[in-house]
Image (tube, grey):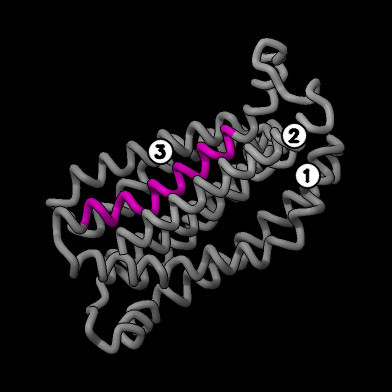
């Protein structure tokens, strides 16, 4: 697999270089003055254009670290069976994330338009709808998976993987929290006002992986969602709430109640169906 990956990477790089060379040649043949020169560059404009791309790239890098970091930690610390248990359980829990993305998708164009036009009234109204949809969809699926997730894991793995209820419940809580933080942070995407959120994502991802590495010896695979929940609450939640309040002019009390309400329901569910 490694030689094939290197071949694909080499082909992609060479294709990009060839595209640049051909484009420069076509520009030069049309008019040599069209060729960009570093000494003529406006660095202030370049930085303003590159900033949104860098922020989005940082968010994607944080997502990659969040996905792959735990797998590397568990494979080194606990071996293949722990990785199989964790990745299978995470896939079941991510049904919530995939579902709320589909449900929220129709509102994206409207949220983007309201954000770009600085229409606070429309943005507040749409934001309330988005948060309400998030609450209904995520809590409904979390409640179902809380009870039948272990059975799904057993059936999916042909009973070769025994579900860990604590790991499943923690991953469900982490997925619900992440979904709410994503919708709270979405208000600034249309206007590229995500610098704080993207930096917070990277800090949270790095610190979460480091904390999971410390806790994995004591808590096993459950150390991963424990670490990520702690850093989401400490780092990402304040940034997401601040972003939502700033972009929509919604009161902090409204945002906090909508953020904490799902966790009240999850705690109630945990009281009825403990680990």
Disc 1 is placed on an element classified as: helix
User: Looking at the picture, how far across and down is residue 138, in whole percent?
Assistant: 55, 65
Which quadrant holds residue 155? bottom left
**Side of 245 where 171 appears, left or right:** left
Residue at left 83%, top 46%?
Answer: 113
Label 3, residues with CA under 10 Å away: few <14, some 14-19, many ≥20: many
Residue 80, label in figure: none
**Which residue bears the numbered disc 3?**
204
Q: How many marks?
A: 3
User: Looking at the picture, how far across and down is residue 219, in whole percent?
Assistant: 18, 55
User: Looking at the picture, how far across and down is residue 152, in whole percent?
Assistant: 38, 83
Residue 249, label in figure: 2
- Of badges 1 and 3, the one in the foreground is 3
Disc 2 is placed on an element classified as: loop
**Side of 70 where 149 appears, left or right:** right
What secondary structure characterizes most of the magenta part? helix
Disc 3 is placed on an element classified as: helix
Label 1, residues with CA under 10 Å away: few <14, some 14-19, many ≥20: many
**Which residue bears the numbered disc 1?**
124
Residue at left 69%, top 18%?
Answer: 37
Does the residue at mark 2 contact the one at mark 1 (Cβ under 8 Å)? Answer: yes
């Amino acid at each position: 697999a490694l030689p094939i990956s290197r071949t694909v990477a080499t082909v992609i790089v060479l294709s990009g270089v060839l595209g640049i060379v051909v484009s420069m040649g076509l520009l030069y043949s049309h008019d040599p003055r069209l060729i960009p020169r570093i000494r003529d560059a406006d660095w202030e404009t370049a930085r303003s254009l590159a900033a949104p791309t860098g922020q989005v790239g940082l968010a994607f890098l944080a997502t990659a670290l969040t996905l792959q970091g735990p797998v590397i930690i568990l494979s080194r610390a606990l071996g293949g069976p722990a990785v199989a248990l964790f990745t299978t359980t995470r896939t079941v829990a991510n049904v919530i994330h995939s579902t709320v993305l589909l449900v929220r998708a129709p509102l994206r164009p409207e949220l983007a338009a309201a954000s770009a036009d600085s229409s606070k009234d429309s943005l507040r109204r749409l934001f309330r709808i988005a948060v309400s949809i998030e609450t209904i969809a995520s809590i409904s699926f979390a409640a179902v998976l809380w009870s039948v997730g272990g059975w799904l894991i057993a059936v999916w793995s042909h009973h070769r993987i025994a579900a860990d209820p604590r790991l499943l419940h923690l991953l469900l809580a982490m997925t619900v929290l992440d979904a709410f933080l994503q919708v709270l942070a979405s208000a600034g995407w249309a206007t590229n006002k995500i610098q704080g959120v993207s930096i917070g994502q990277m800090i949270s991802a790095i610190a979460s992986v480091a904390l999971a590495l410390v806790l994995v010896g004591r808590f096993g695979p459950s150390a991963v969602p424990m670490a990520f929940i702690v850093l989401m609450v400490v780092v990402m939640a304040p940034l997401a709430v601040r972003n939502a309040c700033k972009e929509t002019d919604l009161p902090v009390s409204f945002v906090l109640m909508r953020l904490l309400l799902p966790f009240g329901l999850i705690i109630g569910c945990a009281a009825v169906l403990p680990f």
